[in-house]
Amino acid sequence: MDQEQEYEYTYVIGNTPVFMWTAYNSGSYDEATGVVLTYTIPNGFKYDGADCGGIGTLSYAYNNQTQTGTLTWNVGYMPKDGIVTTYVTLMVEAVGDQTANLTTTANLTHVDQYNINPNNNQNITCAITSPPSADIQVNQTETTYTSNGNTYVTYTIPVTNNGPSNATNVQINDNLPNGTKYISDTSGGTYNPTTGIWNIGTLNNQQTTTLTITAQITGTGTIINTAEETNQDQSDNNFNNNAQTTYITITGTYNKKVDISVYNTPWYYMDQEQEYEYTYVIGNTPVFMWTAYNSGSYDEATGVVLTYTIPNGFKYDGADCGGIGTLSYAYNNQTKPEH
């Protein structure tokens, strides 16, 4: 953080902080050989990748019993005053305030020479804070029926907190569309049919609550109804499940339209300059944000596929989509871009 003149230690679930794992051989003594370092990654993170800049070799292993990952870095030779750094990219998957599962640990595990000061190379930790986060998922189904010559629709809207934290001040908006007339709901007074706001309030981790709205269909054409989350106090790491739309075609046909925008920006933001960081030296590992947004002015989108081309000025270290869809990677030896 440029403005605060300190490192950033707070990240929300889904963020991908890059950790600098550095070793320095003091110039006051001798050159070192056979240097081996380890980096332990607890289960509050998901390992995305690491890059040592071609210095030595890196290997990664995951222990299913302890649920920890370990990077082993065979550095080999380090001259006097030598310094080496590996950039480790992790995705935050837990909440906590510098807890053990959000604390990485670096160690020197071998050097050929006598190690005179183990206090500065054993159990060197870096802990982060991850504030409460709740993934609120909104679903919706509709059922139509006829009674006394009138057609009615019942909208069923289950809302689930996928966690990991409890959520407070949760609010859903379902403003019934033109062509419908509100009849009743099952909220017990927490849904306002005039504003369309459903005040759920507190929704605990793994809890589901359901609203059912009954309306009379009075229009023609296609009746489009959207239920969407509009508020919660905690961060939400998955915005792709915060709304769902249903379509009822009474007359004619309806062809869905979408407006999808794609963004490609650096992740690092300089607070003082109020802009993203676009300057890096060889060996740096910038994180790029590859974002797609489907405009709320049109319809929901299906079958969405995106590509990201990486030219040969970069080395691909890893990517994380936060569990939304699937990612695949291929390298073209002829063109040498990575995608």
Image: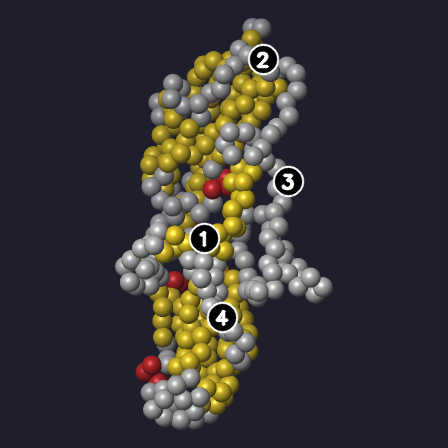
Is residue 315 positioned above or below 303 on the image?
below
Q: Which residue is mark 3?
A: 303
Tag nearer the camera, 3 or 4: 4
Q: At 52% from the left edge and 79% from the top edge, which residue is drawn? A: 55
Return the disc, 1 or 4, that comes first in the chain's sequence.
1
Q: CA distance from mark 3 to mark 4?
A: 37 Å
- The secondary element bearing badge 3 is classed as loop
What crowding class fits label 2: few (fewer than 14 Cα within 10 Å), some (14-19), or many (20 or more)?
some
State the image coordinates of residue 337 (x, y, percent, origin top left).
Answer: 64, 61
Q: CA distance from mark 1 to mark 4?
A: 24 Å
State the image coordinates of residue 45 (x, y, percent, origin top left).
Answer: 45, 61
The residue type indicated by label 1 comes to: Gly
Query: Does the image show residue 134?
Result: yes
Q: Which residue is mark 4?
A: 283
Q: Which residue is mark 1?
A: 14
Tag nearer the camera, 1 or 4: 4
The reply to whether dot 2 and dot 4 touch (C-beta < 8 Å) is no
The residue type indicated by label 2 comes to: Thr
- The secondary element bearing badge 4 is classed as loop
Return the disc, 3 or 4, that comes first in the chain's sequence.
4
* Quarter occupied by the N terminus: bottom left
Return the disc, 2 or 3, that comes first in the chain's sequence.
2
The reply to whether dot 2 and dot 1 touch (C-beta < 8 Å) is no
Q: Is residue 186 left or right of residue 5?
A: right
Query: Does the image show residue 16?
Result: no
Q: Which residue is mark 2?
A: 220
Q: Name the outermost residue toward the top.
A: 148
